[in-house]
Amino acid sequence: MAERKRRSVDPAALAMIDVAGDAGIRTAWDRLESQEPQCGFGKLGICCRNCFMGPCRIDPFGDGAMEGICGATAETIVARNLLKHVAAGVAAHSDHGREIVTALALAAEGNSDAYKIRGPRKLRRLADEYGIAQEGRSDEEVAKDLAEFLLAEFGRQDGLLANVARAPEQQKKNWTAAGAAPRGVDREVVTAMHMTNIGVDNDAEHLLLTSARTALADGWGGSMIATDVSDVLFGEPHPLRSRMNLGVIKEDEVNILVHGHEPTLSDVLVAAASDPELVAEAQAVGAKGIGLAGICCTANEILMRHGIPIAGNFLQQELAVMTGAIDVMLVDVQCVFPSVTDLQKCFHTKIISTSPKAKFPGATDIEFHEEHAMETAKRIVRVAIDNYKNRDPALVKIPDVQEKLVAGFTTEVVSDILGGKYRPSYRPLNDGIQTGRLRGVAGVVGCNNPKFPHDESHLAIVKELIRNDVLVLQTGCSAIACGKAGLLSPEAAKAHAGEGIQEICRAVGIPPVLHIGSCVDNTRIFTACAEMVAEGGIGDSFDKLPVAGAAPEWVSEKAIAIGMYFVASGIFVVIGQPLPVKGSPLVEEMLTKSFEEHFGATWAFQSDPIKAAHLMIDHIDRKRADLGLPPPMYRVPYEPKTAEAERVGPGAAGIALTAEADGEPVAAAISGGCRGPAPD
Ligand code: SF4
Ligand code: MSK
């Protein structure tokens, strides 16, 4: 029992872990135990299955084989394996991006009942940027050209990805010098897979620089396109209130849980679940209504655009089904455990798979195609209504745990809120950093991993950062972890943040931790950094900014791609468990040291979240010192290692945040911005 309690720090998850344990249902934590001890060769990255003379493995102690049958060394094998992981992560994100662009093409035809242009401001801004003709043309006509242009980015054969133009000059120079400037998205994935074949590239440094180029094709290509086009198609997010954790599931409603990543179906499901005809059908079977909630990133997508509550993150997918109150769990692609279909033997839940790319034996397959989106969404809602009668009340156990939060911050929203209604701008944010009221900005993102107590590292690292006046931006399951712990509410500033952040949060009514979306929305951090650079005063390239990133409980190959595109773009990244590269000290050294010369940033591996936060703060302080910025304005628990602090007094105050219901927009008092007094 004591061991069970170490599996999570989330009381709702712990309650359901007990339910699972008492019922003898195996979860990811149990399966991890059955896998132990895990394969050391795999952890170190020194096994190779790239051809069938093998598999081969290198002896890490130097007593046995020091090369594969073909002669590949540990360096080659480790670097080649890493490139394969990056390519797989990029492929997943970028294919997601392609699906969204396909839906945009449908919306542009103007006769889809599911897809419309709901973000015309963003559409026009992208058209301006890419030189698409707009005068006298309807949104649909412009969208048609935009979709064609962006689809071509995936298959681009010549030149560089268009979004490379968004990066600062220094980053572009770095990429050119390192041979890491990204070309077409698909081309980079295919080239990476070619290079990792037996007998192709054996040069570890070249393989690592190619990993950077491949990842950049995601960060400035596939994922960035996914984010932009989602805003055009589903609307630009705005701050809104909602709730998180298993307690959002309602016992007296037909419950549908969406899980996976692509908003093309989940967004349409939001409309279908509130269709009066379907609500009446749900009431006719005895339910009060239709409840929709989500898991993982598809949940983040509909949270930030519609305020749909989130039931949990990655490690809660099985636990949610075990509440016994889920009538349908809808899965599409990425991060879905195959084990969820097995739970159908114990609970009435129907698992519905929808993607032609992801079949789940035992699931009900209702294939989703954009052309019939609304029809498919309604059909799925009806399966849930029909299944409601099969619910066994004796098995329903919903932990009464949920937290309020505010989500929906984007690059544009931050500018609108901080700059004020009439003059959107990043100036106040840069001012805050320049004066030391804000020490810096951090992105904390990524998954849950049962090797760490669920959510513990996310919460520890984020709390340590904000109490030291580092503003935190979040995506993915990390954002959900913090939402469940109450850190995404404006009230969290007083309880957890340093004085500088508290002032800013009071002035503009934002939480100290900003939810900026799903995993593909990590690219919003790039566009925000580009705004900070363009605004001036805190560095003219990403590697000079006092910013850092972390993924404390990462799991997915997508997380490796994300970390790699951040590092290659000049942003220092700390991750919890190390990359599988420790079998080659040379490769580890390149990633954690020599990458600085190529990209102005490195990876770091640190499993202790407080030490990881301190690595990030040390980095931020070094960047501040390089820029000649003053030390933090207020006393902070983790003091700068150098420089005497000369602190100045308090600044602006006074906020108004109104809105209580899920999905209701939050009205912040945005007219004054957050300018406080200058330091001297
Ligand atoms: Fe072994 Fe070389 Fe084949 Fe890898 S590529 S399995 S190291 S022979
Ligand atoms: S869902 S990639 S477990 S963050 Fe984007 Fe969560 Fe990681 Fe999947």
Image (cartoon, grey):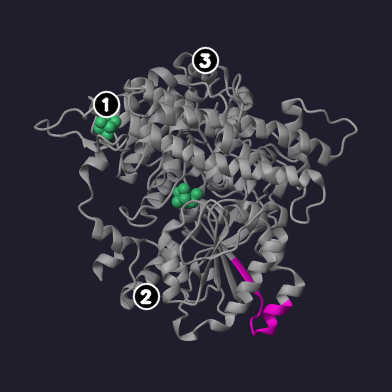
Q: Nearer the viewer, residue 98 or 225?
A: 98
Q: CA distance from mark 3 to mark 2?
A: 55 Å
Q: Which mark is residue 124?
A: none
* Residue 445 versus residue 615 in the image, above or below: below
Q: Would you say residue 277 is visible in this rendering?
A: yes
Q: Nearer the viewer, residue 469 or 58?
A: 58
The CA distance from mark 3 to mark 1 is: 27 Å
Reading the image, the residue beneath label 1 is 75
Asked which quadrant contains residue 127, the reply is top right
Residue 663 in view (yes/no): no
Give me the residue at 43% from left, 47% from top: 462
Disc number for residue 173: 3
Q: Element at badge 1?
A: helix
Q: Amino acid at mark 2?
A: Val
Q: Magenta segment, which residues?
A: 280-292
Q: Residue 299: where, in percent of width, then height?
A: 57, 57
Residue 4 versus residue 585 in the image, above or below = below
